[in-house]
Amino acid sequence: MQRLLVALLPGCLLLSAAIPAQAAEPIKIAFIDPLSGGAVAVTQNGLNHFRFMAERLSRDGRSYEITAYDNKLSPQESIVAAQKAIDAGIRIIAQGNSSAVALALVDFLDKHNERNPSNQALLLNYAAIDPALTNEKCSPWHFRFDAHADMKMQALTDFLQSRREAKKVYLINQDYSFGQAVRKSALEMLAAKRPDIAIAGDELHPMAKITDFAPYVAKIKASGADSVITGNWGNDLALLLKAAAEASLTVDWYSYYASGIGSPTAMRQSGLAHRVFAVIEGHANDPLADSDGIETAYRARFQGSFNVPRIRALMEMLDQAMAKTGKVEPRALSVALAGASYRTMYGQQAVMRAADHQLLQDLQVASFGPLAATMKYDEENTGWGWKTAGRVRAEATALPTTCVMRR
C-alpha cells in the first residue's frame, strides 16, 4: 500500500496543480438610478465611471461587480429595486441622481436593517446633495461622497464675494428637495456675504419635464439680471443653457453641475467663454488629475471625460474599507468608513466625517472656455475645457451638522 501511494503521488500532485484555485466571490454593488427618461445620459455616465473603477480595483484577490437597476427617477421604484438587490444577495447600494430618492432609500434601509440584522445593506451616495441627508435625516447606513448643497453654495458665494460685477442675480432651480435647498442657501448666503446684490428673480420648475426653457430664459432676460445661480443638472441644465444661447442671453452662470454630460456642448454653443462657472471637486486640466493615467485611460474606453471624480473616491474608500474588514458586512464597513481619510486624485486629503458621514474635501470653482496652453483636455469634442478660477479648502466648506447618529 505504501509503495502504491508513493507511485500515485506524482500524478495526484499534477492533477491538483491543474485545478485552478477557486476565485473569491465578487463584491457586488447595486447601482440604482434612472436608466430611462430625461436623466439617462447622466446616469449612464455615472454607471460608466462605476464600471471603470470596478475593473481598475479588481486585483489581489478582490473583484467588484456592478449590477444596474432602473429606478425611473422614482422613490417608490428605488425601494423596489433596493429590495430586489438585497434579495439577490447584494449588500452595497450606490445611488446619486435625486435627493428625494436618497431620502427614501435611507428611510427604507433604516427600517430594513433594524428588522433584518443578518441581512443589512449600506447606501453609498455619490451625488444626492440635499443637506438633510447628513443633518436631520442622517443614518449609520448612509455615506455621502459629494459636498452637499449648502457646502457648494458656501464655495460659490465665497467666490462671488470678490466678483463685484455681479449686481443682479436670478435663481432658477428644479422644484424638489435639492433644488429647494439650493434656493434657500443662495438667498441666505448672498444676504450675508453680498447684501448689495439684488435678487432679480426666483424660479422653481418641474424636474426633468421641461423640453423648452425659452419662456424661462425670456424672464431672465427681462429681469435685467447679470448673473444666474442654478443647481439644475442633466437635461434640465443642458436645455436651459441651449435656450440661453438661442436667445443670446449674456450673463454669468454659477452652477453645481455644468461639468455634467451635455452641458459642455450647450455652453460651447452659447459662446460665453469663461462665463459659466461650476463648483466641483476638480477637472481634467488640474495638474494632478491624470498623474496616474486615469483620465487618458477613461477617455480611451468611453470617449468621454472622467468628470465624476467623487465616484473614484467612493470606490477607492470602499476598497480601503474592504481591505480593513476582509468581508462584505455592512456594519463593519460602516465602522471602517466613518472617520476614514483619503488622498484625492488632486493631491489633497479628504476625510469622511464620522459625526454625519459627509466627505469633507477641497472644492474648486472652475470656468469653461477655449483651450489654452495650460489646458490639455477639452470636453465633448468642443475645443473648450475647464480651468480653475478659485479654490476653497475643505475646512472652509465643513459646515456644522445637526446629525444625531443612531449607531
Image: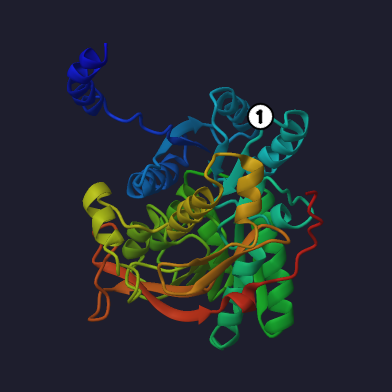
In the picture shown, does residue 261 fall above or below 101?
below
- In screen coordinates, is 256 left or right of 369? right
Tell me what residue is drawn at x 57 percent, y 47 percent: 124
Quarter of the image for the N terminus: give it: top left
Q: Position of residue 112 (x, y in %)?
A: 72, 31
Q: Quadrant of residue 396?
A: bottom right
- In screen coordinates, is 329 left or right of 242? right
Q: Quadrant of residue 158?
A: bottom right
In the picture shown, does residue 336 fall above or below 249?
above
- In screen coordinates, is 250 left or right of 183? left
Give 221 or 120, whichever is nearer the viewer. Answer: 120
Q: Is residue 175 visible?
A: no
Q: Position of residue 279 (x, y in %)?
A: 51, 69
Q: Is residue 252 visible?
A: yes
In the picture shown, does residue 358 fall above or below 253?
above
State the SS at label 1: loop
- Identify residue for label 1: 119
Residue sticking out furthest to the top: 1
Count of numbered badges drawn on the protein:
1
Tell me what residue is drawn at x 43 percent, y 39 percent: 40
Colouring scheme applied when the structure was drawn: rainbow
Tell me what residue is drawn at x 54 percent, y 74 percent: 227
Q: Position of residue 330 (x, y in %)?
A: 62, 41
Q: Residues within 10 Å of mark 1 (few under 14, many from 20)?
A: some
Q: Position of residue 407 (x, y in %)?
A: 78, 49
Tell me what residue is drawn at x 41 percent, y 46 percent: 50
In the picture shown, does residue 229 fall above or below 174?
below
Q: Amino acid at mark 1?
A: Asn
Give 275 or 321, whichever is nearer the viewer. Answer: 321
